[in-house]
Amino acid sequence: MKTTLVIDDGVMRRLRQRAAREGTTISELVEAALRLLLDAKRPAAQLPPLPSFRAGHARADIANRDALYDLMDER
């Protein structure tokens, strides 16, 4: 399948250099890069940790709807 891509000039220059250095085509390099991207499975260990906050103690039991409404009305 043929397609048209819009690629930054600097990236294209580096792509041409690499293709020449490796004795391959730009198309083969792009396809290989896309396959790596699409097949990659990002392990959970690479995800940044979730933030945590010290917000004090709970002011109401979230299972108690009336207590929540009372708390919201306190302002």
Image (spheres, rainbow, N blue to C red):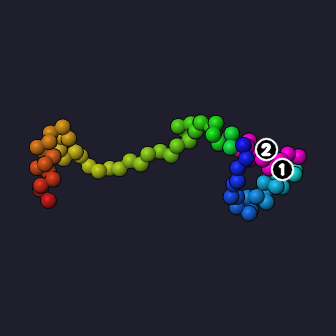
Quadrant of the frame with the C terminus: bottom left
Mark 1–mark 2 CB contact (< 8 Å)? yes
Q: Amino acid at mark 2?
A: Glu
| Residue in the foreground of this view, choosing between 58 and 2 | 2
Q: Residue furthest bottom?
A: 9
User: SS at mark 1?
Assistant: helix
Residue stretch rendered in magenta on the structure: 23-33
Give the residue number, with chain letter if any, for mark 1: 19
Question: Where's residue 13, x and y in %?
Answer: 79, 60
Q: Quadrant of residue 32?
A: top right
Residue 8 drawn in magenta: no
Q: What is the three-letter code of the residue carrying label 1?
A: Ala
Q: What kind of element bears circle 2?
A: helix
Magenta-colored stretch includes residue 24: yes
Residue at point 87%, 51% (across, down): 20
Dot 2 surroundings within 10 Å: few (below 14), some, or many (20 or more)?
Answer: few
* 69 or 16: nearer the viewer: 16
Mark toward the start of the polypeptide (1 vs 2): 1
Q: Kindly identify which residue carries mark 2.
A: 28
